[in-house]
Image: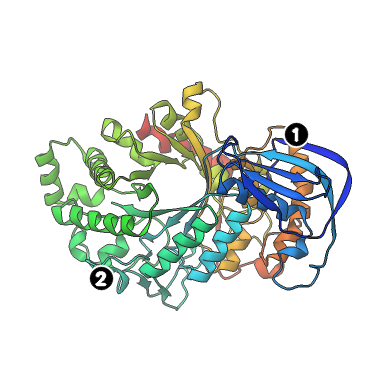
Amino acid sequence: MIPHPKLITKAQGIIQVSNPEPTTSIDETLPSEGYKLDIGSSKDGAVHITGGSSAGVFYGKQTWKQLLPPSLLRHTDGGREGPWPVQAQLIEDSPRFAWRGVMLDTARHFMPLPDVLRFIDLAAFHKLNVLHLHLTDDQGWRIPVDKWPQLTVVGCWRKRTMLGSTIHAAYDARPHGGFYSRQDLQEIVAFAAERHITVVPEVDMPGHMQAAISAYPELGNGAKVGVMEEWGISKHVLNMSDQVLDFCKDVLDTVCDIFPSEVVGIGGDECPHDEWKASPSVQARMKELGLPNESALHGWFVAQMADHLRSRSRRAFGWDEILAGGERTPADVLIGAWRGFDPISIAAQRGFEVIACPDMAAYLDFRQSEHEDEPTPVGTVLSVDVVYAFEPVPEGLTEDEKKRVIGCQANIWTEHMESARRVDYMAYPRLCAMAEVAWGKPPSDEETESFKDRLEAHFQRLDALGVNYRQSSGPRPWDARPDALGKPRSMEDRLEKQPRFIADLL
């Protein structure tokens, strides 16, 4: 999509463009990611892009590509013979948010390197600038760590995979897994950087660690486990020994060595405390540290990891559960607010910078309609219209608090996305809508109608790029997954749970 430009002036008439490659220049008086796209104002009818930086030039080029015939997006020469008629105009534009992201979960289902690169290319075409890469979870470990080699021998493979929601207890009979080599990850970083996308890596801790514990049982709390095969939250979490702290720091050092991103994800979410309550060694650790309960221990652990990242000139990113650490939560931690809309406000009001990614507007694993052929329908209905209506900055914040909402992102959790084709279906066109939200769409009914019209035209571009998007008419027969049944939820059910989600944050 072409996120709605801040300024468009139309000149008289249509010009005929023979060369699809515009001339470019940089004007540092423009916003860094801003650009001017001048089509036909000069006597020779040339096309020129001026950017505030190379990133601004890049975004101007994406807009220009979307003004040309979709056939030019194909790799063949068919339909590439000009000239092409284009409306003479001047577009001046810049983004609203510094963080315009999409999170891709490669832990639940491993996505091979070529598919990740294609995913990045599509995100860049939509002017997104952050790929939040979820590299580890209970169901798989995807990054090599030299000091802990069993992570990519044992921890990266599971014997089978659950099909559909946990309530159906159905599994396939195939091992699943894989991991990225250091060279793979470096290629992802470089490929993304060429497209002005920052790769933000995430290694979730101290929960969501069953894959690591399966490789190194001494990291856990005594239970012998394998890599998790079902979906959901594992109760098997890291213990709090010095060895565990050293392990986590080794992992984060590896991440810092590979990824240049200032921000590094440490998760901190969905960590049950049952094993800690039953563990004499963990209880002794709490007493040694003078901590009153397991929640305080959780906050202490997050602070240890944030301190370590700070020593590497990095900044920790954690999900909104880490706000429960209270005063122990480091002030410089970036918060991913996902449990509804309330944590966005809570984080901003408590002085944290925050990325808005609430499940009710940004979780692209949620079903797209009530249609019976939606594949593995889970969660509430999250249609493209719901995503487009999302406002990342909640009402009721002061001007200073509003500035702390530095961006938004869509989250693609892949429990029910076994292939890049399935990711396409769940991501597009909803990611097109999120891209416009992140860039800064005007809040008006007229703009919503404009979006719907532009989306239908945009489908031709997605066709040219080979994207298996969801059509406006609904899922096609081959998009259904009758072998992987879901568990739909109503919005009323989701809202009933909201008070429990935020009680520990207040």
> Residue 208's spot in the image, x, y percent?
34, 56
**Disc 1 packing (10 Å; few <14; some 14–19; many ≥20):** few
Q: Label 2, on which residue? A: 149
Closest to the observer: 363 or 185?
A: 185
Q: Is residue 251 left or right of residue 418?
A: left
> Residue 66's spot in the image, x, y percent?
73, 54
Q: Amino acid at mark 2?
A: Pro
Question: Which residue is rendered at x = 39% and y = 60% of the image?
Answer: 135
Ranked by sequence position, the earlier of labels 1 and 2 is 2
Residue furthest right in the image: 13
Q: Nearer the viewer, mark 1 or mark 2?
A: 2
Label count reads 2
> Residue 426's spot in the image, x, y percent?
60, 58
Q: Label 1, on which residue? A: 445
What colour-coding does the image apply? rainbow
- The image quadrant that residue 295 belongs to is top left
- The image quadrant that residue 21 belongs to is bottom right
The reply to whether callout 1 and callout 2 are in contact (CB within 8 Å) is no
Closest to the observer: 390 or 486?
A: 390
Q: Amino acid at mark 1?
A: Asp
Q: Describe the element under mark 1 as helix, strand or loop.
A: helix
Closest to the observer: 257 or 467?
A: 257
Residue furthest front in the image: 43
Q: Describe the element under mark 2 as helix, strand or loop.
A: helix
> Residue 132's spot in the image, x, y percent?
46, 52
